[in-house]
Image (cartoon, grey):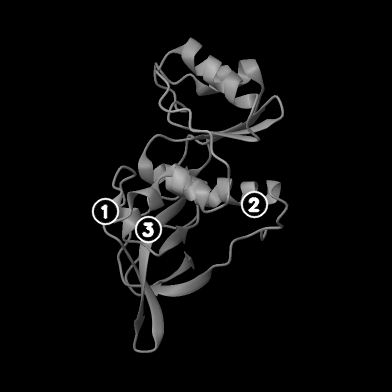
Amino acid sequence: YDSNRYSLNGLLERLGCEIFDMGVIRDNKNSVEKALTDASEKADVIITTGGVSVGEADYIKEILDKLGEVIFWKIAMKPGRPLAYGKINSSHFFGLPGNPVSVIVTFYQFVQDAIRKLQGENPPRHRPSQKMRCESNIRKIPGRTEYQRGIISLREGEWTVKTTGDQGSGILSSITQADCFIILQPTDENIKAGDLVEVQM
């Protein structure tokens, strides 16, 4: 298990980013505001984890409203609903959720391609995916896009996929064991073993 592989710094290093790690900021409005102001003076992209929901100590959206611009906040996805994006001065701001799996999923689905675009690349508009037969029963309530963590296998000449097990957003093993995302669309309902599902490597 390589813990750096699943850390935010590790994800950014693989994109060739220069990282200014500002450490842990106390859940104090003034401390958060000062940290974001300082970051906007030296970084092209600011990324935070936690503080973007609606708890008593979640100040990110309020401070972003004050210092810059909230372009969107909260999206219909699981995990990762409280994701925020905006601008502080000339810096792009991504407020990722606090749970570790939510951080990784939102990074892969939103932040990674944005950084590549800022680096001058031309990432695909839609990440490539393909249909595979699912070996797992998956419970799904319509309304949100879900990114279940999955494992791909070759069974009798056909690529199949199964979930990594419990999909809780605090269960890091659901990422460390996975080699793909099983993408369930907002209109999808429960998946039965044998159904075809969309798989993103």
Task: Specify the amino acid type for callout 3.
Answer: Arg
Q: Residues within 10 Å of mark 3 (few under 14, many from 20)?
A: many
Mark 3 and mark 2: Cα distance apart in space: 23 Å
Task: Specify the amino acid type for callout 1.
Answer: Asp
Q: Is residue 30 left or right of residue 68?
A: left
- Asked if labels 2 and 3 touch by Cβ distance under 8 angstroms, the answer is no
Residue 116 marker: 2
Quarter where residue 189 is shown: bottom left
User: Viewer-proximal residue, 70 or 115?
Assistant: 115
Which residue is found at the position 48% from the left and 49% from the top?
11
**Measured from the top left, where is residue 68 in percent x and y?**
67, 21
**Measured from the top left, where is residue 161 in percent x and y?**
37, 71
- Reading the chain from its start, which is encountered first: label 2 or label 1? 2
Q: Is residue 82 above or below residue 1?
A: above
Task: Specify the amino acid type for callout 2.
Answer: Arg
Mark 1 and mark 3: Cα distance apart in space: 9 Å
Which residue is found at the position 34% from the left and 44% from the top?
169
**Measured from the top left, where is residue 149 in percent x and y?**
37, 58
Q: Could you say whether the residue bearing mark 1 is in a helix, strand or loop?
A: loop
- Reading the chain from its start, which is encountered first: label 1 or label 3? 3
Q: Residues within 10 Å of mark 1 (few under 14, many from 20)?
A: few
- Can you identify the residue that label 1 sits on? 166
Q: Residues within 10 Å of mark 2 (few under 14, many from 20)?
A: some
